[in-house]
Image (cartoon, rainbow, N blue to C red):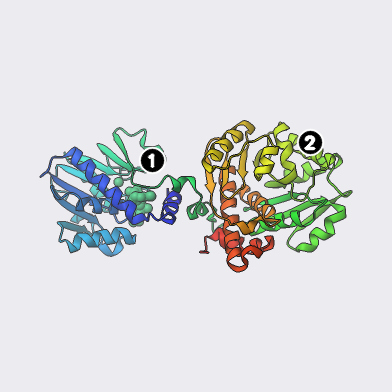
Amino acid sequence: MAAVDLNAEALGVPRKQLMESSGNAVARACRDLADPGASVAVVAGRGNNGGDALVAARFLKAYDVTVHLLGRPETISTDIARENWDALVAAEADRRTVTDSAGFDLGDPDLVVDAMLGTGVTGALREPEATAARAINDSSATVLAVDVPSGVDADTGDAAGLAVDADRVVTFHDDKPGLGDLDCEVVVSDIGIPEAAELFTGPGDLLALDRDAQSHKGDHGDVLVVGGGPYTGAPALAAQSALRAGADLARVACPEAVAREVQGYSENLIVRGFSGDRLALQHVPDLLDFAADRDAVVFGPGLGDADESLAAVREFLAAYGGTAVVDADALQVVPEVDTEATLICTPHQGELRKMGGETDADWETRRDLVREFAADLGHTLLVKGAYDVVSDGDAVRVNRTGNPGMTVGGTGDVLAGAAGALAAVLPPLDAAAVAAYGNGRAGDLAAEAFGGGLVATDLLERLPAALRGDEA
Ligand SMILES: NC(=O)C1=CN([C@@H]2O[C@H](COP(=O)(O)OP(=O)(O)OC[C@H]3O[C@@H](n4cnc5c(N)ncnc54)[C@H](O)[C@@H]3O)[C@@H](O)[C@H]2O)[C@@H](O)CC1
Ligand SMILES: [K+]
């Protein structure tokens, strides 16, 4: 929900506007449950759950409303909730602030709006929320809970002890998994979050990358790039991109004939050569051994399309059970391989057709075609284009970052490497979506500096800022 929220904000629908819609929906539910003139006690906590109800109070002119704020106004935890409290103060609305549990008096209302805690609840109810919850449960009033009954975990439906016993819940945007098992009526209200906030990648998707402060070396991915032969820059770009996208270690397995050259691109890479000047069947057993200890493998950059190299990719994938990003010439073997591996395939439209997939000039048609083809393949697809389409055969995401300057060579290798790093820490669909978003943003940042003259290494430098969400 936080991710969708940020994406909505980036689409021009800020959180405060959503709160106004939530409050409006709460007021509608109140009108449904009580006749005009009825007494309504709005019990508001200090977070946005409370904020929703503070808005609702403004919409309930025909009722006798008393607002109980649990805590001092200075402790309201968000600006938008505080602004809505200030609006009630300015309007001289009937209100009380409850600074300790002894000061809480619910009175004898016809309807209670429980807006103490929503999705922000952690642990058992503290004071004065616990006292207020007991008073609400003891009263004979009808109880309307905002988003989720206070004390209940919206994801699991469980409560760590005491929780409000609601008659009805008005929740927002989408059903919450934990509400299904509750013994009360649940109404889902649309609050105007654009569908695009879930379809298009946006800054909210970057929240998935937040790191645990306690993390150790290796927690963020040990990535192996298998490629090189006819080209040496491609595997080096992909591996460096994996590091820039947050991987802890990036290794390259490439033919001995080009290993020195690949190492020469960066001292940050761990390069291992195999005999000869291109990948072949004889290398597969060693590669499988080496790959087994890695979190993700990126297959393809600079590999070329020699028959023996493609045969090796086929044999590798047939025996491999881990996570792999498949790019460039290696893509063509995917449809014919029976593998246990989790694959993220990153074709451009031409490579997609070569794999047997269909494409279309209209992105909405393309979205549906990509979803169907991903379902057929049983793998995640990231089909590159002005609008990148990502699907695991079920969900679909579309990425709109990037610019025409990125048609330069090497940007695909950067994307594949980033996808490899992200696949080490995120589910495949999210990894592909965030990689596409970050790569495109890095390209947009590079275009600011270099326009149509940008090159792939410019993206490498800007990938960390892009994945941090820095403004272009
Ligand atoms: N897209 C969204 O996510 C939207 C969310 N909205 C509302 O925002 C709510 C989430 O808001 P917040 O994230 O501010 O969180 P909440 O308002 O649910 O709770 C946060 C507050 O509760 C306190 N708290 C946490 N656990 C407690 C406990 N056990 N005992 C006592 N106090 C406790 C925290 O210190 C904090 O002040 C949703 O439930 C919903 O009602 C709406 O405004 C509309 C849009
Ligand atoms: K609530």
Query: 120 or 393: nearer the eye?
Result: 393
Which residue is label 1 attached to? 174
Q: Is residue 376 above or below residue 154?
A: above
Q: Is residue 215 visible?
A: no
Taking the image as shown, residue 261 lies to the left or right of residue 362, namely right
Closer to the camera in the image, 86 or 380: 380
Give the number of marks. 2
Q: Earlier in the sequence, mark 2 or mark 1?
A: 1
Label annotation for residue 191: none
Task: Report which quarter residue 279 is drawn in.
Answer: top right
| Residue 315: mark | 2
Q: Is residue 42 above or below residue 243?
A: above
Q: Residues within 10 Å of mark 2 (few under 14, many from 20)?
A: many
Report if residue 462 is visible in the image. Answer: yes
Q: Residue furthest right?
A: 276
Q: Position of residue 353 (x, y in %)?
A: 67, 38
Residue at the bottom extreme of this rendering = 449
Q: Element at badge 1?
A: loop
Q: Amino acid at mark 2?
A: Glu
What's the residue type where badge 1 is placed?
Asp
Disc 2, ligand 1: is the CB inside 8 Å? no
User: In the displayed structure, would residue 7 be above or below residue 188?
Assistant: below
Marks 2 and 1, how far apart in space? Answer: 44 Å
SS label for mark 2: helix
Q: Residue at x 33, y 34 (%)?
A: 182
Give the quadrant of residue 111: top left
Tell which of 282 and 135 is nearer to you: 282
Q: Where residue 334 sits: x, y (%)?
A: 71, 36
Q: Residue 152 placed where, x, y %? A: 35, 42
Q: Which residue in the rendered view is the most extreme toward the left? A: 37
Q: Residue at x 30, y 60 (%)?
A: 76
